[in-house]
């Protein structure tokens, strides 16, 4: 597809730069990082030096201040090489977006600069051992400390991306039965971080389990107000998380398509190219069509966020829902096309296969998206019928 | 400057269209009736910001600012005139 139709010259130029960065600094190392289940600090520093960790942070705070379409192109280009590596950017953008929107002037001044430059890595601590999508049931608790005027934090979080590297965590819990979000620095007393290894995919994403035992939290670390953490604070972060994940899945989908078509064009079977076989063509046709559809949905979601449209939350869900499912299908088909060689861990498509599944889980599972989108579409239809109904009073 | 009645009409229209109920009273509590979920809460916030050119920040997070059509409209008028919410 000719992207010139949908993107500006500046966006196309940046996308080429992002792809060059990924080809030089990510792609050659992705297999090694996956095996080591770790991304070296030097690679994260390169992200910071390039300004990518501050892609969505305004220039006044030391970020790049790029539009959301450019932000999406960055995540697509890196997602083409390594989903786990892109996950660092995903989470950094989530905590940055939440702070930018809801942080106090002091919090923005203190944290956004270091986050933009990669001097500190952030984590978004929402999920708990017993609470995934059902966020209202969070057991993590804040209680007031009358002596200090601050809070005390107790509880556990699990599956927290960037947890192994993060210097600051946006932690969600309950205060007097009201959801609350607070910034918790890594060095806080009573805060333990336990690495989680051996994940199916995103193995280098630095997942961790967090334990808070009587952690003192100064009142100045509260983000927003009690009662709004799940209705307003988290959704702003998750919005960037969904856009990032959708675009990263789009990159992974492109990776599957490019690897599959290249292999199908060169692999010989009974004297003909693999790609000349109808059943293989069918898999590739489906992959390529989904790739084009996912592109349109992703750029549409990015543009809705750029235009600050109320429907931006729905369009990002649609993009994430479609792109992640299409990535899973494409990765499965890419392994199928590659045969035995695609089943070995050294094959990129084997890594894509494991990574694709994770995109269906993070930032809201496919089923949560189906629940919300299905309800929204039916709800809209009811509204349309109501508006078309003649008013009996007239 | 955002006129109070005009703002209320626009907010009411957006909420009515979004939550699909026939007769929402201007002072009806959106939270108590369970009509607000997190998706709609941020959609309403984004609509208000875009439509009326105001920016909602952490200091504005009070239930009283968004609990009804009247409350949201009053908040927009106060915010537009530069008053602290």
Image (cartoon, coloured by chain):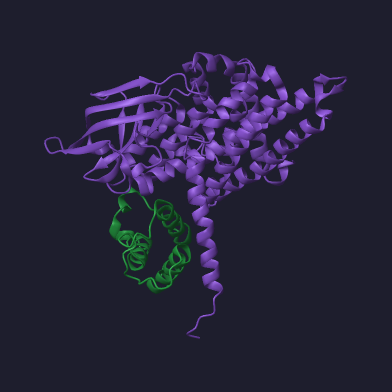
Chain colours: A purple, B green
Identify whether A312 is placed above or below A394: above
Q: Residue at x 80, y 20 (%)?
A: A267
Horizontally, residue A349 falls left or right of residue A276, namely left
Q: Residue at x 68, y 27 (%)?
A: A334
Identify whether A210 is placed above or below B4: above
Q: Residue at x 55, y 31 (%)?
A: A357
Residue at the limit of the structure toward the bottom, as seen here = A394
Viewer-side residue, A369 vs A183: A369
Q: Quadrant of residue A295?
A: top right
Horizontally, residue A149 falls left or right of residue A157, namely left
Q: Percent x, y for residue A227?
A: 29, 49
Viewer-side residue, A166 vs A230: A230
Say if residue A306 shows up in the picture: no
Q: Residue at x 19, y 37 (%)?
A: A150
Q: Quadrant of residue B73?
A: bottom left
Horizontally, residue A366 falls left or right of residue A237, namely right
Q: Percent x, y for residue A316?
A: 54, 46
Residue at the limit of the structure toward the left, as seen here = A147
Q: Percent x, y for residue A190?
A: 23, 24
Quarter holding the N terminus of chain A? top right
Say if residue B78 shows up in the picture: yes
């Amino acid at each position: 597809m000719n992207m010139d139709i949908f993107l500006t010259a500046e966006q196309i130029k940046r996308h080429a730069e992002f792809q060059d960065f990924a080809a030089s600094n990510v792609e050659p190392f992705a297999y090694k990082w996956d095996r080591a289940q770790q991304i070296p600090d030097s690679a994260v520093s390169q992200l910071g030096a390039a300004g990518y960790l501050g892609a969505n942070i305004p220039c006044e705070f030391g970020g790049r201040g790029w539009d959301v379409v450019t932000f999406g192109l960055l995540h697509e280009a890196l997602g083409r090489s390594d989903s786990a590596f892109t996950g660092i950017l995903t989470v950094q953008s989530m905590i940055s977006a939440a702070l930018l929107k809801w942080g106090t002037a002091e919090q923005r001044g203190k944290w956004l600069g270091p986050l933009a430059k990669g001097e500190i890595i952030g984590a978004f601590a929402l999920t708990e051992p017993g609470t995934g999508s059902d966020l209202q049931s969070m057991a993590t608790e804040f209680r007031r400390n009358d002596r200090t005027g601050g809070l005390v934090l107790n509880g556990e979080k699990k599956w927290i991306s960037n947890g192994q590297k993060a210097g600051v965590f946006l932690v969600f819990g309950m205060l007097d039965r009201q959801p609350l979000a607070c910034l918790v620095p890594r060095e806080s007393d009573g805060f333990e971080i336990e690495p989680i290894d051996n994940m199916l995919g995103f193995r280098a994403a630095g997942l961790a389990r967090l334990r808070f035992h009587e952690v003192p939290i100064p009142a100045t670390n509260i983000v927003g107000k009690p009662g709004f953490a799940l209705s307003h604070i988290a959704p702003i972060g998750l919005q960037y998380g969904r856009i990032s994940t959708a675009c990263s899945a789009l990159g992974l989908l492109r990776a599957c398509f490019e690897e599959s078509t290249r292999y199908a064009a060169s692999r010989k079977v009974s004297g003909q190219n693999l790609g000349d076989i109808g059943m293989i063509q069918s898999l590739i046709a489906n992959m390529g069509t989904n790739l084009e559809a996912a592109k349109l949905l992703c750029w549409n979601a990015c543009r809705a966020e750029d235009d600050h449209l109320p429907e931006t939350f729905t369009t990002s869900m649609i993009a994430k829902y479609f792109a992640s499912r299409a990535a899973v299908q494409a990765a499965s088909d890419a392994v199928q096309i590659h045969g035995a060689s695609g089943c070995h861990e050294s094959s990129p498509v084997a890594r894509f296969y494991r990574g694709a599944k994770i995109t269906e889980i993070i930032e809201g599972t496919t089923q949560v998206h189906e629940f919300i989108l299905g309800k929204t579409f039916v709800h809209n239809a009811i509204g349309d019928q109501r508006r078309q109904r003649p008013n009996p009073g007239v | 400057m955002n006129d109070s009645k005009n703002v209320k009409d626009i907010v009411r229209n957006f909420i009515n269209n979004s939550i699909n109920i026939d007769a929402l009273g201007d002072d009806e509590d959106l939270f108590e009736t369970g009509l607000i979920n997190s998706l709609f809460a941020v959609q309403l916030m984004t609509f208000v910001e875009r439509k009326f050119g105001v920016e909602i920040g952490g200091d504005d997070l009070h239930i009283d600012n968004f609990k009804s059509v009247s409350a949201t409209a009053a908040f927009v008028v106060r915010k537009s005139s530069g008053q602290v919410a």
